[in-house]
Image (cartoon, rainbow, N blue to C red):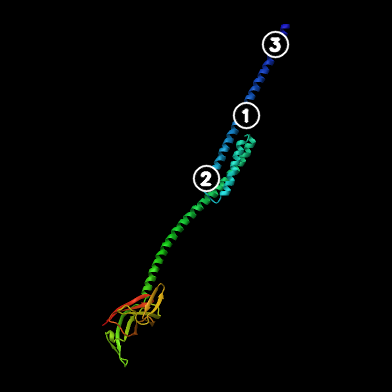
Amino acid sequence: MENQNSNSKLKGIIILLLVLLVGSLIYIFKITADAKTLETTVTKVSSEKENMIKKLEELNSNYDAALAENTSMTDELMAEKERVVKLIAELKSSKGDNASLRKYKDQYKVLEEKMKSMMQEVTVLKQENQQLTTNLESTKVDLDDSKKYNEVLVGQNEELAKTVEKGSKLTVTNLKTASYKVKSSGKQIETDKASKTDILKVSFTIAENKIAKSGDKTYYVQVIDANNNVLGDKATISFGDTSLTYSFTTSVKYENKTVEVSEQLPGKDFTKGTYFVNVFDKAELVSKSSFSLR
């Protein structure tokens, strides 16, 4: 009887130990499974955190590239770049739990959308700048062509003005000088002897010129004797830096038609030799000739 009771107690102990063993095994399995789940979760969260940091750094690089374009959006781009840099710093120092990770994911999405919007604006501005540069280059080429064309026109106009100026100048021709003796009756007799000469007659022709300016014209006549003396008035006039000593002046009313001019220069004690006669239009010598008295 005692042996039977002992066996029953032993069986009970064995069963209890088996139950405890099974329970322990179940607990150990559960703990192991929970540990693996936790490890998997931690690994996943850490991976997502690193991935998000990588994406944020890509955003930061995109902003650097956009800033290098030197557009008019520099201030806006810098402000968004600073937000990205700040979020990267916060994310790196965070615990990396699911709750904070979700918060950073939401902030990342906002920053990503903002970046896409700003990149579109930068692209548009870049295209507009390229078009503006093209237009400016085209305008510069047009301006250069216009400048060259204007330079040609100015050159042509200057040449034309010179031609017109040259063509509008009056031509003095047929300059002649004759010497005369004046009798008591007033009659003039031509002579080539210095001792008998009383007056010199100077004559010349102003040619017809349709494009010349009409009006009163004054010519300065200079007669120089064989001793290099200026005869007549011996008056001096200045034209800028040039001075002219002349024998007499003659005024003509010019109306674009041929005009014959004749003036007399009285004198006495004319010397023998060669005389020179010059006609000036202001300071410009327009005709010259010579004659001799014996």
Residue 15 falls in image quadrant = top right
Where disc 3 sits, the SS reads helix
Where residue 150 sits: x, y (%)? 42, 64
Q: According to the image, label 3 marks what residue? A: 10
How far apart in space, not on screen, are marks 3 and 1 (Cα)?
Answer: 41 Å
> Which quarter of the image is occupied by the N terminus?
top right
What amino acid does circle 2 point to?
Ala
Q: According to the image, label 1 marks what residue? A: 38
> Image point 61% across, 31% down: which residue?
42
Residue 187 falls in image quadrant = bottom left
Residues marked 3 and 2 touching at CB (< 8 Å)? no
Where disc 1 sits, the SS reads helix
Where residue 253 sits: x, y (%)? 39, 83
Q: Is residue 29 visible?
A: yes
What amino acid does circle 1 point to?
Leu
Circle 1 Cα neighbour tier, 10 Å, few/some/many (<14 / 14–19 / ≥20): few
Q: Nearer the viewer, residue 150 or 112?
A: 150
**72 left or right, relative to 172:** right
Q: Given the current orientation, which residue lies at the most extreme left position?
A: 294
**36 left or right, relative to 188:** right
> Which quarter of the image is occupied by the C terminus?
bottom left
Nearer-N-terminus badge (3/2)? 3
Where disc 2 sits, the SS reads helix
**42 left or right, relative to 257:** right
Which of the labelled discs sits on residue 65, or is there none?
2
